[in-house]
């Protein structure tokens, strides 16, 4: 659709030239234009500037007086394809059981896998599309979705086919990640190396044959997959053309950040527990640290030390970790608010982390994440607000009036 937004109170995240990502002090710089126009042609950002230079056109005009426009959120870490919720475990957690204790009692990832293996691809798609539509209305315009609740060849491929179908049927940008190394299924409980071998020898070739994934991921954590396992899986994925991303330092620090950097992974995600040597390993690399504050909030575990990491010159992205066990919400507005309230990130840093840096963590920074000519017109139009600081400040309220993906309003 062709649209001219006029009288925009403030056009946010304006980048004349496309950039990869922002680091350190750069993260606290958020270019904007006040009293602006934004021209959208054929689903792309065609032009922008101050109202004194606004072009005359017969396009549909949206008067944004008192409102703001910013790029839609870029959520680089989700597990939104799953069969059912796990609210019974929520009660267990309230009663004091830990993440590990819930898993040891038959809950956690293995619980989700059991449920997913039992449903058809059609049912799984129907459940997942409802969640996808939900996050689109919440302002997300690009999302990464992982497998990892299958834990068998058949079920992992089923998940990835559902992700592909979602990508084919919806205007939101979707990236797919193979996370077969999410947990060790009961069948292989005493033969983890056999499970890793199955993933590498059987599942990866099938994924490549059907072109079902962009990335490969590993839950590198105590009691899950070791640094050695992670190294082996990342290397195997790279041979199949899959870029690495890893879950790391969620509960313990075992050297996962270092093995990720060694394998040139695109992102290292979670990072709730960070030693100085872990932070130092990331300095000067092109690996994006990704924080998941929803998970910290829900599990009541530490938050990523974002303030320390940014002050030492690192970049930071924010993502929702939308999943049924530890972050049952894909609301990126709450993620941005949590980063400011709980992680001492400024509003500018949080918006940069949830837009351009999130786009980089999905290899989508040339398509989305900023107001740049030629990028997709994936946009949030706010309600009338005083400033963009109101977005995280008013954390319990929606500041969004409309969402546009590829120039079309999401109804």
Image (cartoon, rainbow, N blue to C red):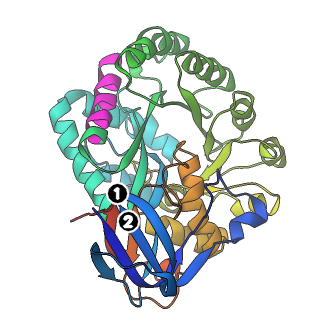
User: Does 157 lie within the magenta span?
Assistant: yes
Q: Position of residue 159 (x, y in %)?
A: 31, 31
Q: Position of residue 322 (x, y in %)?
A: 41, 51
Q: Which numbered disc covers residue 40?
A: 2
**Tally of numbered discs:** 2
Q: Residue at x 34, y 51 (%)?
A: 172
Q: Position of residue 399 (x, y in %)?
A: 39, 79
Instruction: For residue 6, say whether it is visible.
Output: yes
Circle 2: element type:
strand
Instruction: For residue 71, say whether it is visible.
Output: no
Q: Position of residue 259 (x, y in %)?
A: 72, 29
Query: Could you tell whether 74 is left or right of 207 in the image?
Result: right
Q: Residue at x 53, y 51 (%)?
A: 359
Q: Residue at x 21, y 45 (%)?
A: 127
Circle 1: element type:
loop
Q: Quadrant of the C terminus?
A: bottom left
Q: Are marks 1 and 2 in contact (CB under 8 Å)?
A: yes
Q: Quadrant of the N terminus?
A: bottom left
Density class for disc 1 (Cα within 10 Å; few <14, some 14-19, many ≥20) is: some
Q: Which numbered disc covers residue 74?
A: none
User: Does 48 lie within the magenta span?
Assistant: no
Question: Viewer-proximal residue, 214 or 84?
Answer: 214
Tell me: residue 195, above or below residue 95.
above
Label 1 – label 2 distance at C-alpha: 6 Å
Q: Residue at x 38, y 22 (%)?
A: 211
Query: Could you tell whether 330 is left or right of 318 in the image?
Result: left
Magenta part, dominant SS: helix
The residue wearing badge 1 is 43
Magenta span of residues: 153-166
Density class for disc 2 (Cα within 10 Å; few <14, some 14-19, many ≥20) is: many
Question: Viewer-proximal residue, 163 or 301?
Answer: 163
């Amino acid at each position: 659709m062709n649209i001219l937004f006029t009288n925009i109170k403030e056009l946010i995240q304006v980048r004349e030239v496309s950039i990869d990502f922002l680091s350190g002090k750069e993260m606290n710089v958020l270019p904007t234009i006040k009293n602006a126009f934004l021209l959208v042609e054929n689903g792309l950002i065609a032009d922008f500037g101050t109202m004194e230079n606004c072009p005359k056109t017969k396009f549909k005009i949206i008067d944004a007086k008192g409102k703001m426009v910013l790029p839609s959120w870029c959520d680089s870490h989700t597990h939104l394809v799953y069969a059912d919720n796990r609210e019974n475990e929520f009660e267990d957690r309230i009663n004091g059981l830990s993440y590990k204790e819930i898993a040891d009692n038959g809950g956690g990832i293995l619980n989700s896998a059991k449920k997913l293996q039992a449903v058809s691809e059609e049912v799984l798609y129907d459940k997942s599309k409802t969640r996808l539509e939900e996050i689109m209305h919440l302002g997300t315009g690009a999302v990464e979705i992982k497998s990892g609740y299958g834990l068998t060849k058949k079920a992992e491929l089923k998940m990835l086919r559902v992700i592909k179908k979602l990508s084919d049927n919806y205007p939101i940008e979707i990236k797919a990640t193979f996370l077969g190394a999410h947990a060790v299924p009961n069948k292989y409980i005493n033969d983890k190396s056999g499970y890793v071998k199955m993933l590498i020898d059987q599942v990866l070739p099938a994924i490549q044959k059907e072109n079902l994934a962009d990335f490969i991921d590993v839950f590198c954590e105590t009691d899950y997959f070791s640094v050695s396992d992670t190294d082996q899986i990342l290397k195997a994925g790279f041979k199949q053309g899959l870029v690495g991303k890893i879950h790391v330092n969620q509960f313990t620090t075992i050297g996962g950040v270092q093995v990720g950097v060694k394998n040139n992974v695109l992102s290292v995600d979670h990072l709730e527990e960070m030693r100085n040597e872990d932070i130092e390993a990331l300095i000067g690399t092109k690996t994006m640290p990704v924080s998941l504050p929803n998970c910290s909030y829900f599990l009541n575990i530490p938050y990523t030390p974002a303030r320390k990491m940014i002050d030492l010159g690192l970049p930071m992205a924010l993502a929702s970790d939308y999943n049924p066990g530890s972050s049952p919400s894909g609301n990126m507005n709450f993620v941005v608010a949590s980063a400011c309230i709980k992680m001492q990130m400024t509003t500018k840093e949080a918006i940069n982390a949830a837009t351009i840096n999130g786009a980089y963590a999905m290899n989508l920074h040339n398509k989305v994440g900023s107001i740049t000519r030629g990028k997709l017109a994936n946009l949030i139009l706010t309600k009338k607000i005083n400033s963009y600081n109101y977005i995280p400040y008013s954390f319990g309220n929606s500041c969004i009036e409309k969402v546009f993906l590829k120039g079309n309003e999401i109804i």
